Every structure is written in structure tokens, then in C-alpha cells.
Image: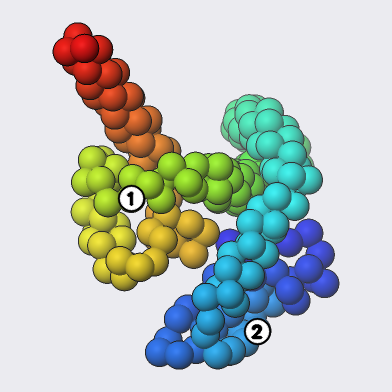
Amino acid sequence: MNYCLTKEEEETFILNYVEEKNTITIFYANGQKETKPYSKELEKQILNQMKSQVGNAEKLLRNCKEYIEVSISSMKFNSYASFLFFILAISFMFLNFSVMEIISLFLSIGTLGKSLIDRKKRNKSKQILEDIEKQKMLIEKEKELKSHEKEEKLLVGVPRIKREALEYIPSEKTVYNLHTADLLSYEDVKQILENLKEILKENNFQEKMTLNRMKSQE
């Protein structure tokens, strides 16, 4: 997802990349794309830049959180105001105050429209927020996910179509990273990390049981 703060950033901001035979095509936020000869080193550089982009998104992350908080109050106010102006318009209609009726009706429509615009912007901010948080979670747990990516339990609760998409990833490739992040939603990643937590807990329990048996046999 494009979450650049300026047009200049879009020129170098990497959205994702695609491997095709011996090439790798990089897609930028400004709509441009660049094809280069594939190499593991180049792919590593691209992923490192994508990680840096997530790290640099803290300012936008704060802005989104603040906007969501403010927009909730704004939407409530505009909804109540729209309802109030609508009631006034009805009242003026019965009292034959045609001018006031028209003004109230326009104010009702205006505040309702403002509420709908706020809702749309809030949903966009929430989408950006969740996308950044999703990527941050994948980066934070990258090593643990790499160690357990073949565990079937890891994908319990993830929609079937997404499980199948992940299964098509070549065995020599890392399954859970920023390259594959677009295949998963914020909720999917939360579910996967919850599954990972349970797997690690079970593994720790098994290790303790093994150690206890070994000690009892000494």
C-alpha cells in the first residue's frame, strides 16, 4: 500500500515486486515499474528497503491514529446535527416557514454529507494503519515465522484461498515477509501470530517434558 507523505517519496517507494524467470520487476508508488536481472542480493536489498519504509512510517501512523480518534467524534456530531436540522426542517414546513425550512434542509444534507466524507476518510486511515501494523508484526516475528513456516497449525483460522496461495510459494523462498504481506489481511496476520504463540508454547512444554524425563533417568 502507498502511504507516502509526499510525491517525491513515491518515486522511490516500493509497493512490491514480482519475479519472472530470470528477472525481477519492482513496482513503485508513483505507478512506475523497473525490471532488473534477478539475484538473491537484489531481492534482499528490495526487502530491506521495504522494511525501512515501514520503519519510516511512524509519523503517518500517528497521524492516522489521531485522525481516527477525531473523526469518530466528528461523525457523531455531524450525525446528530444532521438529524436535528432535519427535524427543524419538518417543523418549519408545518409552520409554513419556507425559507427556514430550505435552510434547515440544506444544513441537514450538508452535515450528513460531511459525516459520510469523514467516514470514508476514517476507513482509509484505518486501512493504512492496519497495513502498517500488519507489516510491523511480520518484521518483528520474521525469525520465528521462518523457523515454523512449515507447521500446518500456523494457518489454522486463515481463509482457505489464502492458505492455498501461500502453499504455491516455492520451498526455497521465505513464506512470511513483506513480499507476501499483500496476500494476507491484518486479521490474518493476527491469527497466524496467535497460532505461532500456541506452537511455541507447545514446543516449550515438550522440551520441558523431555528434560524432566532425562533427569529422571539419570
Q: Position of residue 159 (x, y in %)?
A: 26, 50
Residue name at image x 52 percent, y 85 percent: 38
Give the distance between the C-alpha atoms of the residues marked 1 and 2, in whole angstroms.
Answer: 33 Å
Q: Which residue is mark 2?
A: 32
Please say if 90 is above or below 175. above
Q: Quadrant of the N terminus?
A: bottom right
Relative to 212, 30 lies left or right = right
View extreme (top): residue: 216
Please say if 15 is above or below 62. below
Relative to 95, 191 lies left or right = left
* Earlier residue among tags 1 and 2: 2
View extreme (front): residue: 218
Relative to 144, 64 lies left or right = right
Q: Position of residue 44 (x, y in %)?
A: 58, 68
Relative to 149, 104 lies left or right = right
Q: Which mark is nearer the camera, 1 or 2? A: 1
The amino acid pointed to by label 2 is Gln
**Which one is in front, 120 or 17?**
17
Mark 2 lies on a secondary structure that is loop
**Which one is in front, 46 or 157?**
46
Mark 1 lies on a secondary structure that is loop
The amino acid pointed to by label 1 is Glu
Residue name at image x 49 percent, y 48 percent: 142
Q: Which image quarter: residue 7? A: bottom right
Residue 149 tag number: 1
